[in-house]
Amino acid sequence: MREYLLVLLVAAAVTYLGSAFCRRLAFRVGALARVRDRDVHTIEMPYFGGIAMLGGVGAALLLSWQLPFLGSQATVQQDSRAVLVAAAVIGVVGVLDDIYELPALAKFAGQVLAAGVAVALGVKVLWIPVPGNPILLDQFSSIAITAFFILVCCNAVNFADGLDGLATGVVGIGAFAFFTYTYVYTVSQGLTRATTSSLISVVIVGVCLGFLPHNFFPARMFMGDSGSMLLGLLLATSTVSLTGQIDPSQLASDRGLVPTILPLVLPLAILALPFLDLTLAFIRRTYAGKWWFLPDKQHLHHRLLQRGHSQRRAVLLMYVWSGLVSFGVIGLGLVHGSRQWTVAAVVAVLALVLLLITLGRRPVRPVDALPEAGRTGVALRD
């Protein structure tokens, strides 16, 4: 645990210090969030938070390879190197998009390339946890499912990057939940605690903590696509790498149904809000006869603002929802027997209370007319 904590602190420190430099660099090269018709902000905001995050990821992983506990595991080193290379690829794609605003298809091609790099270097889904009989995947299915999952995660986080600190906090909370699960699971099963999943998850928590002071309302800079796609890729690969280091037969134990399917459900729980937003956007835009990647102002965070919530309150509500879903699912997996019903009941009650708080305000003026965003210069991004 001490080595994980050290890795987290290094990731946070490098990201925090690097963000100030990257902010100045963004101004110098013109990587700015311009004022567009579909935005609310009235001033230009610098991007390149993703570069600082990538620096934090690189520093943390380089350190982990030198530590006696994490560095002694060949599989962890191999997988984390693959993740770092793929992260660098998607970081370059994101930086180009932050500067030149790449066409959607070009950006998608870059995501496919990064996913292909991760797969080629060995980060793949090897099995699917089906109760009683985990399914071992053939080569083609393994590659296709891995690439698809990475692409979905990248775009889901990108969609969630709509308010100051929203994506940073939601992903950080989800990553912490996933780290909790992987670490507790390896301890309870008597397995090695050095896993790629735990390592990448704790690195994500570190870079999110390091960047959040620069990005929380009112933000001084944005992570840009270089950051949102990076976080999506890291979350996806941390989940994917789990199937390469946990024996699927151990999941089909007498501990019940929930622990068996938890590795399949947990990624959906961690990114429940971004996945929901992505799905609703796809349905909404397709029904309107538009391409799914064309932006609009009907995302979940936009609707919270329309109901009268301030930006800070809306973001904090999304944080609580993310934590409730993520840790609620983990709680169901870590307890057994009748206690699962107790956890489910507590989560259901908390969800109902949170829903009443979320919907407790009446709709106000459209997002375009909200004065708060205009005064502070904070963007509502797609």
Image (spheres, rainbow, N blue to C red):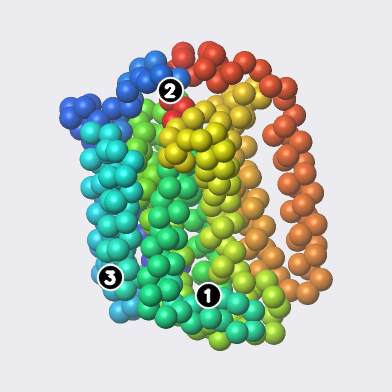
**In contact (CB < 8 Å): disc 3 and disc 1:** no
* Rendered location of residue 299, percent (x, y): 55, 34
Residue that extends furthest to the left in the rendered view of this protein? 29
The image quadrant that residue 100 belongs to is: top left
**Toward the viewer: 234 or 70?**
234
Please provide percent x and percent y for residue 61: 30, 62
Q: How many residues crowd mark 2 within 10 Å: few (<14), some (14–19), many (20+)? A: many
Which is nearer the eye, 53 or 92? 92
Disc 3 is placed on an element classified as helix
Residue at 49% in and 56% down: 175
Q: Looking at the image, is 319 positioned above or below residue 238?
A: above
Mark yes or no: residue 219 visible: yes
Q: Amino acid at mark 2?
A: Asp
Secondary element under disc 2, as helix, strand or loop, is loop
Is residue 332 positioned above or below 370 on the image?
below
Which circle marks residue 128 in the picture? Answer: 1
Under circle 1, the secondary element is: strand
What distance separates the C-alpha of mark 1 from that of mark 2?
41 Å
> Where's residue 58, x and y in %?
27, 56
Residue with the mark numbered 3: 120
- Distance from disc 3 to disc 1, alpha carbons, whole Å, reads 20 Å
**Residue 39 numbered tag:** 2
Q: Position of residue 206 (x, y in %)?
A: 40, 52
Q: 232 and 17: which one is in front?
A: 232
Amino acid type, callout 1:
Ile
